Image (cartoon, rainbow, N blue to C red):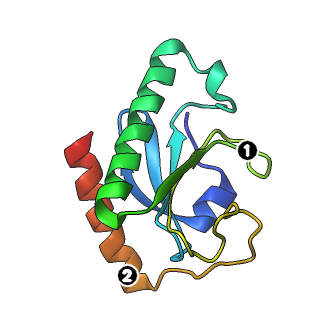
Amino acid sequence: MFSLNERLQADTRHVTDLDLCRVLLMNNALWPWLILVPMRENAVEIHRLDAADQMTLMREIAVASRVVERLFAPDKMNVGALGNMVSQLHVHVIGRTRGDPAWPGPVWGSGHARPHEPAEAESLVERLAEALRADA
């Protein structure tokens, strides 16, 4: 049975579930930042997913990337699966803008964070969920 890592739960808001992935919004308003978590028990590495899940994951990453581009018009998309702090397989989809607080470096370890205001987060989750479902 799928369960979400406690740290991911604490740092995000649930947006929607796609065919494979639970889509989360990172609680950092400095970047449009989604996290896709394949709903597979004990999933740790992309290459260990079966072929069908690998293909679905890539499709859902593309969907999430298109939605972030459409809603936020970033200069560059950053997509990555690191897993050094949280081993549960999850993929970051982050819209980056020239001059953002961490540009041109990575967002991780930049020391920059600003939690979403509750009303802002709720509105953003609704917009993202609607766009993701429409594009999926």
Residue at 60% x, 43% y: name it: 90
Between the residue at mark 2 and the residue at mark 1, the CA separation in whole angstroms equals: 28 Å
Residue picked out by circle 1: 83
| Residue 35 x, y percent position in the rendering | 53, 52
With respect to residue 129, does 54 lie above or below? above
Q: Quick check: 67 left or right of 113? A: left
Residue picked out by circle 2: 120
- Nearer to me, 35 or 103: 103
Looking at numbered disc 2 in the image, what kind of residue is underneath it? Answer: Glu
With respect to residue 87, does 98 lie above or below? below
Helix, strand or loop at label 2? It is helix
Question: Residue 17: in sight, yes or no?
Answer: no
Residue at 40% x, 76% y: name it: 121
| Residue 101 x, y percent position in the rendering | 63, 77
With respect to residue 129, does 62 lie above or below? above
Numbered tag placed on residue 99 in the rendering? none
Quarter of the rendering occupied by the C terminus: top left
| Residue 134 x, y percent position in the rendering | 20, 47
With respect to residue 46, does 2 lie above or below? below
- Nearer to me, 96 or 33: 96
Neighbours of disc 2 within 10 Å: few (<14), some (14-19), many (20+)? few
